[in-house]
Image (cartoon, grey):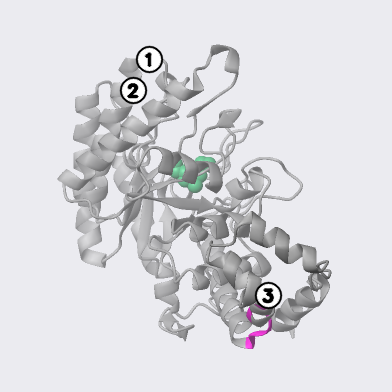
Amino acid sequence: MSKIQFRHYRPDEVVAGKTMRGWLPFSMSWWHALGAAGTDMFGGDTADKSFGATPGTMAHARAKADFGFELMQKLGIEYFCFHDRDLAPEAATLAETNARLDEISDYILAKSKATGIKALWGTANLFGHARYMNGAASSNSADVFARAAASVKKALELTVRLGGRGYVFWGGREGYDTLWNTDTKFEQENIAALMKAAVAYGRKIGFSGDFYIEPKPKEPAKHQYDFDAAATILFLKKYGLGGDFKLNIEANHATLAGHTFRHELRTAADNGMLGSIDANTGDALLGWDTDEFPYSVYDAAECMYEVIKAGGVTGGFNFDAKNRRASYTPEDIETAFRMSMDTFALGLKKAAAIIEDGRIDAFVRDRYAGYGSGIGAKIRSGSATLEELEAYSLKSEPALPGSGRQEELLGVINEVLFG
Ligand code: XUL
Ligand code: CO
């Protein structure tokens, strides 16, 4: 029994015109909650995630599902995310692997029907097996490409079967370590080809949700093609995938790219591509993907401000987060979820309060007021020529633009957040 209880998360409470549950479709990640057991580069598992069964067996796959559904029910979480590999261990052949996935998805589907808990999104693990050492769709081996495509096909079928809202591509090894052995254009064309084939097959089997790319700049590859939201959007538009794809923005990936989480959310939203969120956080002092449970109310308020402005996400908030190595008990898992769900609930309330307060939005609106009439309106309409703008400028020198008032606005935010 966790000592942390919800103080802010009330699923049916209406905030900014929608219930908390509507703004925050929370999701459990199968790989972290039911898989990650504390192993790091320097030591093995600290947590026991056998759930009373032998790891690597189908009995263990079922035991994980049992624990996962119990946890989600206890927390009021209505969605889960999965890789094919999280659900059942890989077998010696593809046919056998697929049979295992059929078996476990029967088991999960029965639980889903009984509880109403569904998949938020599914994906294929195209980075763990040795065959993917040079990437999956970006591999130099056409046989590996074909095998990756077969896994995407199966993972799409599982996603549809388990009611998934979305399907994710995270290109862990879709990148390069040295340009001396890599044809980057060739590889990206192949990635686009696999995505196009996935869209065609997904639509054929009745998948009506969004496909997502989850940007990440590095780790495990030194350079990953889906570096950040901007690079990913360019790729999607270049290959004509923009209609079927949106982005799954992960907080820790944003900071790895040298951006803030909020920057990535804004970039996605500006382009109509804010699909889903992998809710976690990194550590400011560590330069890698620590996948911590998010706890910063400030960051959550910034996130929810962007989400409210965008009208919400079409996907959800997947806790792509794991307990710290030294927090190894089952109680710690439940506590982590409660703490982070409450962080986002409070962040939502605070973001709504910032909007309600109105000072920030009014300031931003007024900051661009010069574009409301005269030469500014002409620029906005796209009809101002360089000759015209020169003639205008010859008449008078521009005054300094208005002060950005950054410190004042930060004070306003502190006041709304903390009183
Ligand atoms: C890795 C990561 C993945 C994706 C799904 O950094 O975030 O777990 O979310 O493949
Ligand atoms: Co993720």
> Circle 3 — which element?
helix
Cα gap from disc 3 to disc 2, whole angstroms: 53 Å
Under circle 1, the secondary element is loop
**339 horizontally vs 310: left or right:** right
Q: In this view, does 278 lie above or below 151?
A: below
Mark 2–mark 1 Cα distance, whole angstroms, equals: 6 Å
Q: Residues within 10 Å of mark 2 (few under 14, many from 20)?
A: many
Measuring 66% from the left and 56% from the top, which residue is drawn there? 387
The segment highlighted magenta reads 357-361
For disc 1, the marked residue is 141
Label 1: few (<14), some (14–19) or many (≥20) C-alpha neighbours in 10 Å:
some
Residue 182 lies in the magenta-colored region:
no
Cβ atoms at labels 2 and 1 below 8 Å apart: yes
> Of marks 1 and 3, which one's residue comes earlier in the chain?
1
Q: Which of marks 1 and 3 is in front?
A: 3
Amino acid type of the residue tagged 1 in the rendering: Ser
Residue 232 appears at what percent x and percent y?
49, 42
Q: Residue at (50%, 55%) from the top-left corner?
A: 268
Q: Which amino acid does label 2 sit on?
A: Phe
